Image: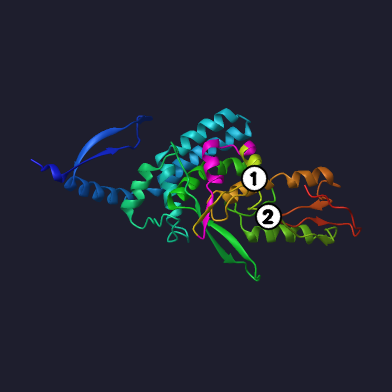
Amino acid sequence: MLQPEKVQTCLLVFYCMKGGKLLNVSISTISYQDKKLTDTQLYQDWKTINWNQVEKSVNKLQTRITKAVLQNKWNLVKRLQYLLTHSYFAKLLAVRKVTQNKGKRTPGIDGERWLTSISKIKVVLSLTGKKYKAKPLKRVFINKPGKKKKRPLGIPTMYDRAMQSLYALALEPIAETISDIRSFGFRKYRSTKDSCQQIFLCLSKKNSAQWILEGDIKGCFDNINHHWLMTNIPMEKSILTQFLKAGFIYKRHLNPTKAGTPQGGTISPILANMTLDGIEKLLLAEYPKRNKNSTKVNFIRYCDDCAPRKRTHATENCRIV
């Protein structure tokens, strides 16, 4: 019989799938020896994951979200987003993403890093939006290439990064469906080379544009209006509020976040892109096509960097939208 001091009573709170239904909480009495066996099993579970199956399962749900957006069935979109953010496979992908990128060894304010297979699978089992409270970001400054001015960077905790990655999986299909056609920054299967190719196509013809206007939105990530995001971004509002209002710690002082999305957050590029989507349509409405194969103004955007190309030599008034 086990000695009382060798017995640890704990509440195991996790969800698992069985027959398409969610099973809830169980209270277990676990000995230290059983706990070691559990950790060993968890290690084996992470090492034996079939990632192809995981990605296929998540992609199926994302495809269904895309189809629902195209059919303008937003209630169905919400239900599918809920399924995805509560999916075990989606949580696996979210944790893998934050533990395999360049910042995997950079902790947030809690100093926590997930470097072992056991820690990763434990986080997968505990990842949930229920009563979620985001921790403040760690504010650091990094050098801008070719400039003396430094760029503010907000580093979330590993758990917050995983939560952002999880909800980004549900938001990304919507962002990709409604995005500007010639938007190339921070998008899946698109890169700077694609934007360069589009620029070449716009400038290589006889009747191509003669003038290039390069635009860079000052402090784009830092000045996005929170009210606009809460009104227009189709995701769970309580979770989005936590992402936006987490605040940041700089020189041991907690500062509120009144505007913007933190550079360093996993979901921030998607939010920034969705904020800027629509500029291309406005330009096409203002400067319609001259014929089937030629446009009066071409617009190419790489996140907050844009380059409208205009044929006329005349100076015209510009409006900032």
Give the side of residue 53 with respect to residue 283, left or right: left
Extreme-front residue of the structure: 253
Q: Secondary structure at mark 2?
A: loop
- Which dot marks residue 41? none
Residue 85 lies, in percent from the top left, at: 47, 38
Residue 258 lies, in percent from the top left, at: 61, 47
* 23 versus 153 height, above or below: above
- Judging by the rendered image, the residue that carries numbered circle 2 is 304
Give the side of residue 209 with respect to residue 36, left or right: right
* 283 versus 140 height, above or below: above
Residue at the image position 79 percent from the left and 59 percent from the top: 213
Residue 143 lies, in percent from the top left, at: 59, 68
- Which dot marks residue 274? 1
Identify which residue, 317 or 240, lies in the foreground.
Answer: 240
Residue at the image position 83 percent from the left and 44 percent from the top: 286
Residue 276 lies, in percent from the top left, at: 69, 47
Q: Give the magenta-colored segment's residue range.
A: 231-251
Residue at the image position 47 percent from the left and 50 percent from the top: 161
Q: Is residue 288 visible?
A: no
* 234 versus 299 height, above or below: above
* CA gap, disc 1 and disc 2: 11 Å
Q: Are marks 1 and 2 in contact (CB under 8 Å)?
A: no
Residue at the image position 64 percent from the left and 61 percent from the top: 193
User: Which class describes the residues within 10 Å of circle 1: few (<14), some (14-19), or many (20+)?
Assistant: many
**Label located before the other in sequence (1 or 2):** 1
Q: In the image, is residue 31 part of the stretch drawn in magenta?
A: no
* Amino acid type, label 1: Met
Identify which residue, 36 or 249, lies in the foreground.
Answer: 249
